[in-house]
Image: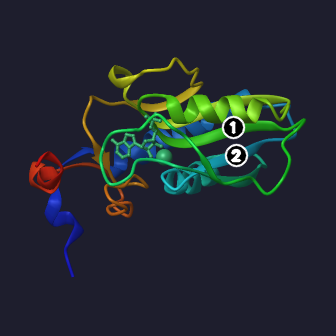
């Protein structure tokens, strides 16, 4: 069996910084939704699963959770721009205060599609929380109310994010060694 750490070049965001920032974002969300008795977190699968788990634990208020699966990258590192729901929510969201929880906003196509799709279902409010943001790669303008970290234009893995479905279980945000992508260049 392969050691997943063997292909890591360096940690872009280590575990301590990640957890400290998640607590700050959670405290901000707790404060902003004060006085509202409903909050529904919608986790974008698969990449958002680890962030959802930690953000949910860090929130000091009641909330419910649901999951939505959307198509993401294939085995490459470029978005096709075409987004598709592959698993829908279990419940209607009309009248709910909805917060979308996503791992990263890159081109913006995924969150733009999610925002439009969920708005059409008439929630009471709709906001987005993304752990990571690559501002330099944006192709569509999307309002993201909560952002953990702005990062440079590097393909990152770990903490839910994958390359070819691997590395999601790293507890930090990492950049892989260039050799890992070598087969994509040929
Ligand atoms: P967008 O639609 O281009 O904004 O891309 C959003 C989706 O692409 C995210 O939900 C991720 O699944 C994936 N993605 C974008 N950048 C990265 C990255 O650096 N590493 C891993 N997945 C990424
Ligand atoms: Mg994702």
Q: Which colour scheme is used?
A: rainbow
Count of picture labels:
2
The single residue placed furthest to the bottom in the displayed view is 1
Which residue is rendered at x = 49% and y = 28% of the image?
108
- Give the image quarter of residue 142: top right
What residue appears at the point 76 percent right and 29 percent down from the top-left corner?
119
Q: Where is residue 146? Give x, y as percent.
A: 56, 29
Q: Is residue 60 visible?
A: no
In the depicted view, which residue is nearer to us: 116 or 84?
Answer: 84
Is residue 65 something one can see in this rendering? yes
In-image side of 22 versus 63 (left or right): left
* Secondary-structure class at tag 1: strand
Instruction: Give the Cα distance between marks 1 and 2.
Output: 5 Å
- Image quadrant holding the N terminus, namely bottom left
Q: Do the residues labelled 1 and 2 touch (CB within 8 Å)?
A: yes
- Observer-nearest residue: 166 or 55? 166
Residue located at (39% from left, 52% from top): 161
Q: What element carries label 2?
A: strand
Residue 46: x and y in percent read: 52, 56
Quarter of the render that holds ligand 1: top left
For label 1, the crowd category at 10 Å Cα-Cα, with few meaning under 14, some 14 to 19 and many 20 or more, is many
User: Residue 164, which numbered label?
Assistant: none
- Tell me, for residue 99, which label it has, or none: 1
| Residue 180 drawn above or below residue 42 | below
- Residue located beneath label 2 in the image: 41
Can you name the residue that lies furthest to the top here?
Answer: 141
* Quadrant hosting residue 20: top left
Measured from the top left, where is residue 34 in percent x and y? 79, 31
Place of residue 177 in the rendered image (x, y in percent of width and height, measured from the top left): 13, 51
Name the one closer to the observer, 10 or 179: 179
Mark 2 is surrounded, within 10 Å at the Cα level, by few (under 14), some (14 to 19) or many (20 or more) other residues, namely many
> Sequence order check: which comes first, mark 1 or mark 2?
2
């Amino acid at each position: 069996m392969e050691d997943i750490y063997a292909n890591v070049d360096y940690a872009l965001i280590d575990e301590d910084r990640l957890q400290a920032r998640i607590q700050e974002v959670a405290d901000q969300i707790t404060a902003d939704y004060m006085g509202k008795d409903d909050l529904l977190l919608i986790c974008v699968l698969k990449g958002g699963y680890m962030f959802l788990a930690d953000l949910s634990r860090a929130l000091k208020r009641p909330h419910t959770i649901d999951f939505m699966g959307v198509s993401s990258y294939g085995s490459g590192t470029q978005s096709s721009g075409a987004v598709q729901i592959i698993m829908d929510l279990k419940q209607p969201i009309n009248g709910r205060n909805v917060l979308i929880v996503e791992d990263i906003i890159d081109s913006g196509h995924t969150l733009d599609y999610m925002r439009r799709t969920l708005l059409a279902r008439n929630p009471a409010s709709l906001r987005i929380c993304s752990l990571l943001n690559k501002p330099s790669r944006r192709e569509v303008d999307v309002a993201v109310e909560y952002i953990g970290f702005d990062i440079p234009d590097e393909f990152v893995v770990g903490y839910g994010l994958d390359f070819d479905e691997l590395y999601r279980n790293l507890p930090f945000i990492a950049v892989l060694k260039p050799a890992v992508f070598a087969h994509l260049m040929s």
